[in-house]
Amino acid sequence: MSKKHILIIDDDPDQRLTVRLPLEAAGYQVSEAKSSEEGLGMVKQVRPDLIVLDVMMDTTTAGFQVALTLHSPDPNSEYKEFRHTPIIMLTAIHSTTPLRFAPDSDYLPVEIFLEKPIDIEVLLAKVKELLPQ
Amino acid sequence: MGISHLNGDRAYRTVSNSTRAGNTRNLINAELVVSVSWLIKLRWIAGAGVLIVTVVIENIFHLGAPYTMLYGIGVSILLYNLYFYVSEQKASKSNRSEIYYQRLTIWQTVLDWIAMTLLFHYSGGIESPAIWYFIFHIIISAIFFPLNIAFTISILAILLVSGTTFLEYVGILTHQPLSGFLPQPLYQQPLYILGVLGFYSSTAVIVTFLVGSIQNHLRQRESEIIELTENLQRTTKRLQALNECAKIVGSTLELKQVLERMVETTAKAMEARACSIRMLDKSGRYLEPVAVYGLSQTYINKGPVDGLTNLLARETLSGKVVNIPNAPESPLLQYPEEARAEGIKSMLSAPLLGKNGPMGILRVYAVEPNRFNQEDEEFISAIAAQGSIAIENALAYQGIQELDKMKSQFIQMVTHELRSPVSVTRSLLRTITAGYAGDLNEQQRDILDRAVRRIEFLQKLVDDLLDLATGKAQPKLDERPVPTELIAVIRRVIARYQIPVKEKGITLEFLNKCQCEEIRVYATIEGLDRILNNLLSNAVKYTLKDGKVTISLERMDGEVHLAVQDTGIGIPEESLPKLFQEFYRAPNAKEIENEGTGLGLSIIKDIINRFGGRITVESKLGKGSTFNVFLPLEGVEKP
């Protein structure tokens, strides 16, 4: 059985490293994208099984846009084959985002929100839950 | 016709010293109304008198006379008086104008003179005893009308009597004697005629002069009283306005409100058409309209007012009260045409002077020329002085608020920038300590653990700071306190502490004294969670083994009392006043836990304040502490 592929979309290289190391150690194949644009390109290229997505990148809500694009219910969406690819969203409640408290899945088609700083054990548990071997 | 003149004349005389004719006009009008109704009352008596006297001379004295005419005159007087009575009753109900009453008076006078002349003629002309009845009307006119008019009326009476006598004398009018009244006809005796007419005329003139003079004197007194009353009313009004301004100074710090209330109060107190305040803009040169009462938008937006080139503005800003009696013609005006179009004839400008020089101009506008006197100048000066204080206070308050907001925004920004690297650093360190970057020896692990602990403290500090700053910055609309159920939040937070409480060996109890399963307060769920979490975490942290923590809930008058009581280490008395200050930690708290930010209580105090509630603390060192939180109940008017 081939390794499950996880794509990290985050503009902070240090943050990407802290997510990447434990995931690789847990036996996943990991790719990185450093912007929402690059991320959307990589999704088609590497066809990930799961995406770890940061909210604040080039704009304060760039991550929300990526999630909405990927999980769009529009049948003609160019990303329609990724509509069910699970997304873990990394948020910072203590931020200057217009949305002070993290929105829940009623508002955004995202499987799980994780608040920064990331607890590695929690991250690994959630990934395992979303990607049963 | 004479009467409308004479009333105009009186109006002028009475108010010549005052341009505020409103009150005086009302008084004259009221007097006219009273005199009309008085004349009507008297005329009932006069008409009835004519009829009674006719009955008496016909039936008791059996004199010969043209009785049909005499009865006719009496009945006519009563009939036209009935008409005037009805008209006057209607007019008093519908509050008719002064002109209407003047017309009514003229018509009454004309009809009265006709009736009297007829009565005179049909009761024997120069032989008639009714001749003296003319004196009544002469007296009445001398009371109500100015002297020249009264003389005109008495001369008219003399002419009517003399004319009738003459026409009877020469035979153009048929003499209508009361036969049996005089032994022989006298109407053609020149000496008798001259004698009676001479005494009659002199009586008329002397009565007019005497009554008129006395009345003039009284009238002068009356107008003095009216003027004094007016002055008194004006002074009272101004004192009230000053008092109002003093109240404005004390009551509100909102600049816009202060200015708007000031212009309205000033315009009303000075009975002026309009009032405005212009303030110097940031450049300190141009005057911007900031509060206006009674002016059109067109006039307000007439163009820029430059404090350097606009002569009126420059003069006022130099610290003087400037009185312009002839507004559109004044060379000081920059916009005379606009003032003319607005109907402004007088202006009074006063400087608003602050501690650091002029701040703006308070100006009053009137539609009458030559309107403002020295008294007005003094008054506007007083108002402007009061207003300047109010404006300075409001500006200072505004400045402080802006500064506080800027400070919060700055802290928020800085903290956010701090938070991100701290958070990532911690995650990076954790990947190493968790072994994802290879094995560590014991010393390396120990050092990294220490680093992680330090970073975790820094992170908590930054989080708390950010909360404090966010709370102080403008609360967002969707975070406004709404009716929120409290008991569920209490139970949820208590559940969170079940394990730590068991581990520490202390008991945690919830006493619901309000006998209800739901209670709603003005708050947000996040806020309530934060308040309870903070108080409970403190209580658990500072309570030693075998101690007890009690949360109690009680409904009080309009609010909910939530108490978190512990049997912990307590708070030293000298620390109590500083407890809610940012970064303050009681010395004995530091002994229990070294790493605390001292921000928790100031954050929750801020949240509780935003909910319209309050927090108090009681404590005894070594015995325990109680934190009391009061929150407004749903449905209770919020302060």
Image: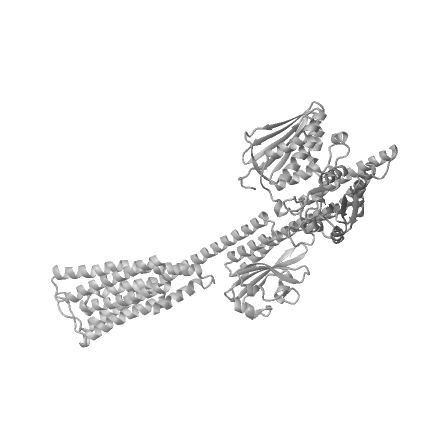
Nearest to the observer: residue B610 or residue A115: A115
Residue B83 visible (yes or no): yes
Q: Indicate the position of residue B604 as horizontal and vertical percent values.
A: 66, 38
Q: Indicate the position of residue B324 as horizontal and vertical percent values.
A: 56, 65
Left or right for B615, reference B78: right
Up/down of A17 relative to B307, above or below: above
Q: Quadrant of the N terminus of chain A?
A: top right
Up/down of B560 relative to B358, above or below: above
Give the color scheme: rainbow, by chain, secondary structure or one colour. Answer: one colour
Up/down of B62 relative to A81, above or below: below
At horizontal 58% and vertical 66% (from top left) the residue drawn is B302
Residue B571 visible (yes or no): no
Q: Indicate the position of residue B505 as horizontal and vertical percent values.
A: 70, 24
Nearest to the observer: residue B328 or residue B551: B551
Nearest to the observer: residue B461 or residue B163: B461
Up/down of A86 relative to B545, above or below: below
Q: Quadrant of the C terminus of chain A?
A: top right
Image quadrant assignment for residue B547: top right
Q: Indicate the position of residue B304 as horizontal and vertical percent values.
A: 62, 65
Image quadrant assignment for residue B464: top right
